[in-house]
Image (spheres, grey):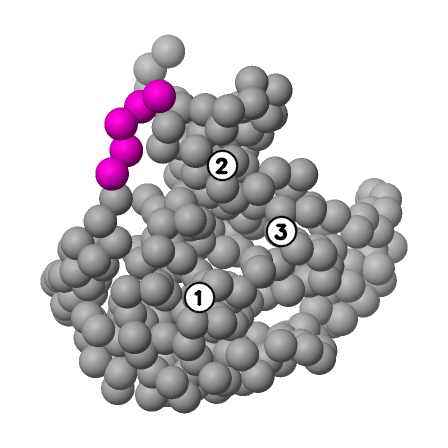
Amino acid sequence: MAEYSFDPEQARERLVAKIRDSVRGAGVSRVVLGISGGKDSTVAAALCARALGTANVFGVMMPDGVQKDISDSMKLCRSLGINHRIVNISEMHNALLKAVEAGSNGEIADFPVAFSEESNVNVPPRLRMTSLRYVAQALGAFVCGTGNLSEATVGYCTKDGDTSCDFNPLGTLTSVEVVQMGLTMPELPRELVQKTPDDGLSGVPDEVKLGLTYRQIHDYLRLGTCGDPDTDQKIAAREKGNMHKRRMPAILDAWND
C-alpha cells in the first residue's frame, strides 16, 4: 500500500490563499459559482468567501424546472451570507430541444438527429455554464468550478459544462477529501457537507449510477488500489477512456509532421 496523509486544515488554508492570488492576480475581485446544495459547491463557496469576502461571491442556483432540494442551496447561501440568484434554465432547455427537432428549412441537405436521453442529460450542465458565463461577464467576475478529482477520474462530468471554469479549487481533491475539508469549516451546515451526492438530474445517487463508491475511487487514487482488482480495472478503464474531458482540445500542427 502507498503512504497517504492528508491534512484538511492545511489544504484549506493553501486553497484559500491560492484562490485569492489567482483571482486578484488577474485583476478580478469577484467570483461566480453554481450552487447545487451538494458538498462540492458548498465547500467551494466557503473557500471563495474566506478568500475574497462574502460580498465578492455570487452564487447562482439553476434548476431545470422544479428542483426538490433547492432549499439546501438557499440554506448554504444564507449560512455564508453570499449574494445569490435563481436562474431557471427550463425554458432554455425546452427551446433548444424544439430548435433541434425543427431541423432543416429545406434549403440544405438534412441529416437525422434522433433524440438521445444521454445527450439530453448533458444539456442542463452546458446551459448552466452558459448562464454562469453570462452572469460572470456582466459582473466582471471569474467562474469558480466545483468538480472534484474523483468525478473527473471516472468521467462523471460534462464537457463544456461543469468542466469549464476559470479556476477550480477542488480539482486535486477526492470526494472523500472534500468532505473532510468541509468538516473543518464551522460556517457550513454539516448536513450539506455530508449530503449523499447525486447529479440533480436523474434522482439516482452518484454511486448507484457509477457502480462505484467514492471511497473505492479515493483508495484507488491515493493508495493505488481499492482492495479489489476487478474494481481497480474498472476505475482504470474509465480513467483512460475519459481523459479527453480533463485536457484542453488538441491543436493539430499544420507545420510539422
Relative side of 32 to 37, left or right: left
Q: Position of residue 125 (x, y in %)?
A: 58, 60
Residue visible at 33% across and 15% down?
256
Disc nearest the viewer among 3 and 1? 1
Asked whether residue 120 is drawn in magenta, I would say no
Confirm whether residue 217 shows in the render: yes
Please check the rendered image and state whether residue 4 is part of the magenta-colored stretch, yes or no.
Answer: yes
Residue at 42% from the left image edge and 49% from the top image edge: 176
Residue 3 - label: none
Closest to the observer, 176 or 104:
176
Q: Name the residue under label 2.
A: 217
Say whether disc 3 or disc 2 marks the residue closer to the N-terminus: 3
Residue topped by disc 1: 193
Of all residues shown, which one is farthest toward the top?
A: 257
> Which badge, 3 or 1, is on the more N-terminal residue?
1
Image quadrant where residue 100 sits: bottom right
Magenta segment boundaries in residue numbering:
1-5
Tell me which amino acid carries mark 3: Asp
**Disc 3 designates what residue?**
206
In this rendering, is residue 142 above or below 237?
below
